[in-house]
Image (cartoon, helix red, strand yellow):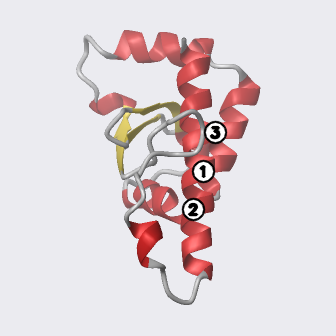
Amino acid sequence: MRSLIIATASAALVFSAAAAQAQSQQAEPQQPQAQQPQKGQAGGAPMVRSVNVVDVTELPAETRPQVDAAAAKAKPADLKSLRASIDKSPEITKALDAKGAKSQDVIVANLDQQGLLTLVTKKRG
């Protein structure tokens, strides 16, 4: 289940970053594109609309064990892919910077159907 969440979030991040890059490369956005549905390309996964960065220490006590368990199950390759996708997205990187975090601090990611990407971070050191 955890790998699925990371894979979904990672895919959505990649597609959101690609969409953002494509839009920034266009001189003027075309009207028909702006009216298209806002779902991502990967099997209808939603695009990232907003980012919520939460440090694991800010989580309610009853939630921390679940997050720790999910983080423990995460495969290193999945985390590496997720973090690489984060680094490709200026919006997500900016949200992490605002919280004093970097992509390497992300231990869990969740993307809901409304496009809210929640990144749980844990400071190293």
Q: Which of marks 2 and 3 is nearer the N terminus?
A: 2
Q: Earlier in the sequence, mark 3 or mark 1?
A: 1
**Cα separation between marks 1 and 2:** 6 Å
In the image, what residue type sits under mark 2? Ala
Q: Name the residue under label 3.
A: 82
Q: Residue at x 49, y 10 (%)?
A: 69
Residue 125 appears in the figure: no
Q: How crowded is mark 3: few (under 14 residues within 10 Å), some or many (20 or more)?
A: many
**Cα separation between marks 2 and 3:** 17 Å
Q: Quadrant of residue 110?
A: top left
Foreground of the two, 52 or 4: 4
Q: Nearer the viewer, mark 2 or mark 3?
A: 2
Instruction: Provide residue 91's location: percent of width, then percent of height.
Output: 46, 62
Instruction: Provide residue 58's location: percent of width, then percent of height.
Output: 28, 32
Q: Which residue is drawn at 48% across and 79% down?
A: 30
85 sits left or right of 61 in the view? right
Q: Which mark is residue 19?
A: 2
13 sits left or right of 38 in the view? right
